[in-house]
Structures are given as structure tokens and as C-alpha cells.
Image (cartoon, grey):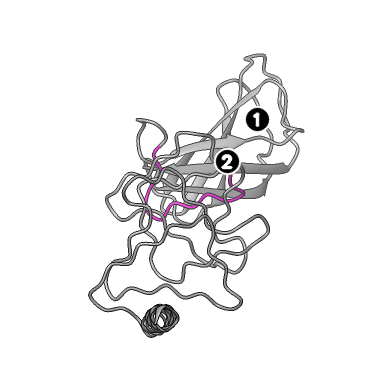
Amino acid sequence: MKKLHSVSVLLKKSLGLALFILVLGAGVAGAALTFTATQFTGDGALTINASTTMNIGTTDTTVITVGRAGQTVAFPGNVSSSIIDASGIMEIGTSTATTIAIGRAGQTVRFPGTASSSVLIADTSLTVSTGTAITSHISATASLAFGSISSSTSCNEQTISVTGADTGNTVVSGAPSNVATNTSWSAFVTSTNVVAVRLCAILNNNTTIVPLAGTWRVDVWKH
């Protein structure tokens, strides 16, 4: 009788374990399962799915590690977080991404550390610290020949076509290395898309100055 009882208990336990494994494999609805383990290992693909919200480590967990060194971790959906931190280099969109959007219209995005980029493009305006917003920067070059300048009361002007320039814009000119000595120069927008470079003699000694032709650059800043 004792042997029959032992066999009966063993069969019940085996049947219960089999039913648990069967139910777990088919999915458990409306139930909470708690597992205590240091490691879960699968011989194939392991899928954990939730119809609404799946919480991992939301109570007492301090560190959650996903993936390993040299492994690609993919998040096909939207990832929302208040903090994303990396101890080394954190790469975003370094493989096939074409556009990476950070922030939204009307929002301030800050980089407290040092931001490095080969190209910086601002769609509407660029503000440095608390300064005035810069809406556009335009640059152009041209070879200019001013002709002779006879005295300190004389100036000659040449123009450069700068598409997008408007009167009142800030203009800075860059002179060539062969610019004539004893001269000064300035640049300004004379009309839409036209910048004038004015070269003047600064000594009143009745000496004629003949500047050599050279390539001048003008930079136009719009606010």
C-alpha cells in the first residue's frame, strides 16, 4: 500500500509539472508569474511579449544590462527615456541612418558637454549663448581690380554678386595677400544680391596707388 501511495504521489507531481510546462508554453492569461534565477538560457529564440505594458526592473532594480560587447541590440519601436547614459562612446545612427531628429519645434535642446560635428546646419536660425539669432551666413569671392587711387581723399569701389544679400546686412571683407599698402577697405550691401568693396588711400601725399588685382572674399550675416 505504501508503494502504491508513493507511485500515486509521484504521478500527480509529474502530471502537475507537465501541465505547468504546457500552460507556460502556450501562454498564461490573467496571471502573474514570478521567477527567481540568476540566469535564463534558451537553445533558440526567446520571446517575451506583452499585449500592453511590460515592466522590467521597475521596483528595486538598480542596473539593467541589455546585450554584450560587440553585439547589436535592436529596438525597432519607439524608445522613451529620461536618461540614456554610456560609460564609453554612445553611437546613434552610425550605420545606415540618413536623418536623426533630436527635440521638436519650439523646444530647447542642450548639450552641456562638448559637441563635435563636421557639419552644423540650422534650418531657421542659430543662436550662440544669449546672443542675437543668426538666420543666414552667405559667402562669395571674386577677383577685383580697383584701378589707380591718387590721394587720401580718393576711394574706388568694386562689386561682388552675393545671392541673398540685402541692404543692412552685416558684411565682413577678406583682402588678398597682395593688397596695396597705405590703404583701407570696407564692404557693404549696395542693393539686393550686390556687395561693394571700397578701397581707399590713407596717406595725403599726392602719391598714386595702383592696387594689383586679387581675389577678395565677402561674408554676409543675416539676423
Give the residue at x 33% y 60%.
55
Residue 70, image x, y percentages: 68, 58
Which amino acid, mark 1?
Ile
Which amino acid, mark 2?
Ser
Q: Residue furthest front?
A: 1
Residue at image mark 2: 87
Query: Which is more N-terminal, label 1 or label 2?
Result: 2
As for residue 125 lying within the magenta part, the answer is yes
As for residue 215 lying within the magenta part, the answer is no
Question: How many C-alpha atoms fall within 10 Å of the one at disc 2: few (<14), some, or many (≥20)?
Answer: few
Q: Secondary structure at mark 2?
A: loop
The stretch of residues the image draws in magenta is: 116-127
Give the residue at x 59% y 78%.
44
Tell me if residue 182 comes above or below residue 158 in the rendering. above
Q: Secondary structure at mark 1?
A: loop
Tell me if residue 77 comes above or below residue 81 in the rendering. below
Give the residue at x 38% y 66%.
78
Residue at image mark 1: 149
